[in-house]
Amino acid sequence: MRPATVRLIFNALSSLASVYVGLVLYVFTSIEIEEHHDLIDQLEHRGEDFYRRFRQSAAALKQRRADTADGSDGDGEPEGPKCPLPPPDENRAVHISNEPTPYLLRTGRAKYLPAPKPADESCLRWKSNNGCWEHYQSSAMLCRFDDMALDVTKFHVSRGGERPEDVRGRNEEEELFQVDYCGVYLPYKPVFWTQWYQSKLMDAAGVGLVPDRSQDQCDVYLPGLTLLYERIEYANLYHTMTDWFNVHWSLEKLKYRGGDDGRQLRMIWLDGHAAGSLDDAWADIFHANVTYVSQYKGIVCMERAVWLPKNSPIYDVPKDSVEYGYEGGGYGAGGFSSENDKCGVMDRFVERVLTAYDIPLDRTMDPALDLVIDRQPYFAHPRVDMEKAAKDTRTLPDLRDIFPNSRVIRLHEMSFRQQVELISRAHTLKGMHGAGLTHLLWLPRGAAVTEWQPSTEDFDGNPMFSNLASWVPGISHVAGPVPQKSKGFVERALDFLFGRSTGAATESIASPSSGYAFDRGDQNYYGRDMIRGDGGLNNFGSASGIPDDDYRA
């Protein structure tokens, strides 16, 4: 037999053996993953910690090479510009007392103790990616750094926290930060693509040593855990809730258990948005001090820093379509039922919010409490055009006449605590498609949600809140047309005599129990597919398919 043929046969047998071994290992690993998920998390964390230390040592070596006479990396190729460390200054009094007074101050003791994460929790599976973690389902990126620093003098952003009326008309670009090169010091530089704020931090970071407080190189030192974040739709409840959820599942991944162990939690908002009605809830829900980056001065050093994820989370799709297991082919690969409940991260998020406001988890539904959300314009942020907002067709002027037996509420006139306390007892929640329906998360078992969707191209058939409702056990969701006040006999007679109608395709279906009618101007109302799962921007300039309607609750 020719040597070439022997080699070919040998290679084929080797390949078959490799496939067999791979299959055995896959099955064994799959079993072990389910049974020893916490152990795997620990091993993964140790491996990532080793990787961070290795990258930090490599960065130090590169810094020493950059300090040589020719500035080369040992191969004769220039390394490029480096971020010089600040010179030691004995006059720096580095202490926590140097931290500015937070914009939002935590009060009392942390009330939330998270429920144990089950070993088969399929919604909290992350994989390592260039020193950060990437979520299997949503491709969210979560980065944690042991030792990081910001040179705040290189950040350019508005101050933040002003009354919206005092900065009326301020351009949104002024409220989103820009940072010069070397404004960020990292022990290693992660590399991944994102359209969010992390890309600005990566572009501004030089690979080199991080300022050391023991060498008098820090103006402020922040011990414990510091979360960095840039908000976008900060006055919109749906988008803010998405931000809160990103904080929540990041803390679960990091196994942060609150302040009882002496560790401190703080957040730094990298944006410079004006004050918003939802601001206080950040400190309430997470028991954290919140500070704008503009409040700091000089070099800010952090013991542990986290870049929070900033993209659409898992509940943008129905719960039963979330992939099951570490690997999979995307949505619908495997799957599970709501009763089986293999994804409890949303339940624990709801638990976190309710506990922060002393609302019992086994809340009792009030069968007489039927709520209707009345969307009205208000000055939520500096760019609200009140004249334009008043003309929004989703404002219904006759809700109290249409629903005389229901309680009509205006969310912007209530604190967030009051909103959650009220809605957590409701029997029904009705409202126009909009951010206020995000409150369905707090409804008790047996409650019902009615979402009115205007029959226009931008709203018709949008599954956003039906998807969100699938994550809340025991509630129902129905989408329907916009209600209209029923016309009396005289009005109908005049319409008939003078030919006044909304068109041949319009059908009014009266409800004798509530005294309102549905306007079905489009007979194909339920037939359109408006799923927007790409996380991109829609025609309203906002993500996740929800209009940019921050001037409304």
Image: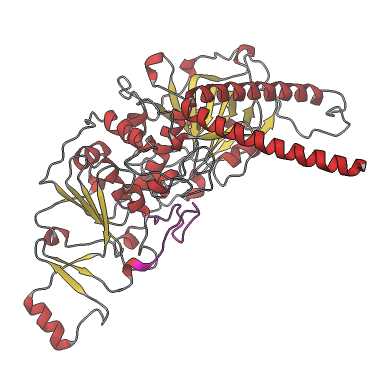
Q: Residue 76 or 518: which is nearer the viewer?
A: 518
Q: Residue at x 30, y 74 (%)?
A: 523
User: Left of 42 or right of it: where is 262?
Assistant: left
User: Left of 364 or right of it: where is 69?
Assistant: right
Query: Residue most toward the left?
Result: 489
Residue 544 sits inside the magenta stretch: yes
- Percent position of residue 254, x then y: 48, 26
The quarter of the picture where the N terminus appears is: top right
Query: Residue most toward the right?
Result: 2
The answer to whether residue 173 is seen in the rendering is: yes
- Percent position of residue 195, x then y: 56, 47
Position of 45 relative to 348 (above/below): above
Count of marks placed on residues = 0
User: Left of 85 or right of it: where is 225?
Assistant: left
User: Left of 439 or right of it: where is 317?
Assistant: right
- Percent position of residue 31, x then y: 51, 30
Residue 335, by quadrant, is: top left
Residue 443, by quadrant, is: top left
Q: Residue at x 40, y 22 (%)?
A: 257
- Percent position of residue 220, x then y: 53, 20
Q: Residue 434 or 213: which is nearer the viewer?
A: 434
Q: Residue at x 27, y 46 (%)?
A: 440
Q: Residue at x 29, y 29 (%)?
A: 356
Residue 405 sits inside the magenta stretch: no
**Which colouring convention does the figure follow?**
secondary structure
Position of 466 relative to 228 (above/below): below
Magenta-highlighted stretch: main secondary structure? loop
- Magenta residue span: 527-553
The answer to whether residue 299 is seen in the rendering is: no
Q: Residue 49 or 58: which is nearer the viewer?
A: 49
